[in-house]
Amino acid sequence: MAIIDSLSQLSAQPGRFLLNARDQHLVVDASPGRGGQGQAWQAAELLLGALQTCSHAVIDDEARKRGWQHYGLAIQARCEADEDRPGHYRYIELTYRFTGITQAQAEELVQVFTTVCPIYGSLSRGAPVTLHVLA
């Protein structure tokens, strides 16, 4: 079982944070409503990007295993905050646009993604979240 670890730290600029994982670094902004500049990636964009990245990784691997190498895929992702339930999204939506394979093949690949992607599984079925607060 692989444990994934990352660290987020404040930067010298209000509303800007630094994410570190392995030897990789990413600048992230809070939304403008939370004091961010809106120039770097924001949290919801990272969430959608994680789903898109896992989708592409799983689907591309599965397509290659099946010998379907001449296909194309673009994934549009979107979410909307739920104003009636603060702290929730009203929906998260992924739209897959395949070329070069049939509808049945496309659905087969997406089914594999929904079965094996831990990010999708955690979001769609809910995963326990433990918070440790240290001062």
Image: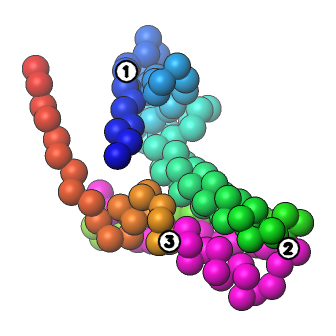
Disc nearer the start of the sequence (3/2)? 2
Q: Give the range drawn in magenta.
A: 86-113
Q: Is mark 1 on a helix, strand or loop?
A: strand
- The relative height of residue 45 versus residue 35 in the rendered view (above or below) is below
Question: Is label 2 in a helix, a strand or a loop?
Answer: strand
| Mark 2 vs 1: CB contact within 8 A | no
**Residue ID for mark 3:** 114
SS label for mark 3: helix
- Amino acid type, callout 2: Thr
Q: Name the residue under label 1.
A: 9
Question: Disc 2 designates what residue?
Answer: 99
Task: Report x, y in % for residue 104.
Answer: 72, 88
Quarter holding the C terminus is: top left
Nearer to us of marks 1 and 3 is 3
Residue 73 picture location, percent across and down: 77, 65
User: Quick one: 37 or 19, which is closer to the camera?
Assistant: 19
Label 3 amino acid?
Answer: Thr
- The number of discs equals 3
Against 65, residue 41 (above or below) is above
Residue 129 is at least partly visible in this image: yes
The 10 Å Cα crowd at callout 2, few under 14, some 14 to 19, many 20 or more, is: few
Report the Cα–Cα distance between label 1 and label 3. Answer: 32 Å
Residue 125 - label: none
Residue at figure coordinates x 16%, y 41% from the top left:
131
How packed mark 3 is, by other alpha carbons closer than 10 Å (few <14, some 14-19, many 20 or more), is: some
